[in-house]
Image (tube, grey):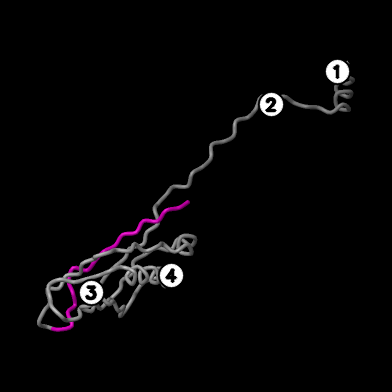
Amino acid sequence: MKTAVLLIFFATDALATNAICQDATLTWIVFKEPVYPQMARIAHIQGRVTLEITLQPDGAVAIERATGHPILVQAAKDSVQESILGYEGCGEESHTFMVAYEFRMPDVAPQIAPPAPVSARLLHRVRSIRCMYLWKCGTA
């Protein structure tokens, strides 16, 4: 079974909706790891998905914009929606953060099976009865 490597990058700057507080930092209280979609594994689809999320003070998450392959975008959206997020550094304001998921398939060299051993029985030549008759007659 193939395994998929998932790297997650978080943007360090928050795009604050108010100019008063720009030092908000995103914290992941509970992180739900995204599931690498089976169709993406079969088709060897990989790449980066970037989500622009708006986080409310009560913890509600709204996904404003998403870029990347559509199959991978849905997996990233599901991950953010199922995770519990918070932010620090500002009070009762909503903030916009950029979150990037990197979906990668591992580079595995194809394994070539070693050649099957040749049995000694296959090396011995087998002849039919008719051939044996002609062979004996031809040498006399």
Q: How many marks?
A: 4
Residue that label 4 marks:
71
User: Is residue 2 within the magenta segment?
Assistant: yes
Q: Earlier in the sequence, mark 3 or mark 4?
A: 4
Give the mark nearer the N terminus: 3 vs 1.
3
Relative to residue 69, is residue 123 depicted above or below? above
CA separation in Å, label 4 and label 1: 74 Å
Q: Quadrant of residue 31?
A: bottom left
Q: Where does the magenta region start and end? A: 1-18
Crowding around mark 2 (Cα neighbors within 10 Å: few <14, some 14 to 19, many 20+) is few
Q: Earlier in the sequence, mark 4 or mark 2?
A: 4
Q: Nearer the viewer, mark 4 or mark 2?
A: 4
- Quickly name the residue at label 3: 97
Q: Amino acid at mark 3?
A: Phe
Residue drawn 36% across and 62% down? 103
- Circles 4 and 2, Cβ within 8 Å, touching? The answer is no
3D distance between C-alphas at marks 4 and 2 = 54 Å
Residue found 17% across the figure and 79% down from its top: 16
Within 10 angstroms of label 3, few (less than 14), some, or many (20 or more) residues? many
Give the number of the disc on residue 139: 1
Q: Is residue 123 above or below residue 87?
A: above
CA distance for labels 3 and 1: 93 Å
Q: The residue tagged with tag 1: helix, strand or loop?
A: helix
Q: Secondary structure at mark 3?
A: strand
**Mark 4: which amino acid?**
Ile
- In the displayed structure image, the side of residue 132 where residue 121 appears, left or right: left
Asked whether the beta carbons under mark 4 and mark 1 sit within 8 Å of each other, the answer is no
- Mark 3 against mark 1, which lies toward the viewer? 3
- Quadrant in which the C terminus appears: top right
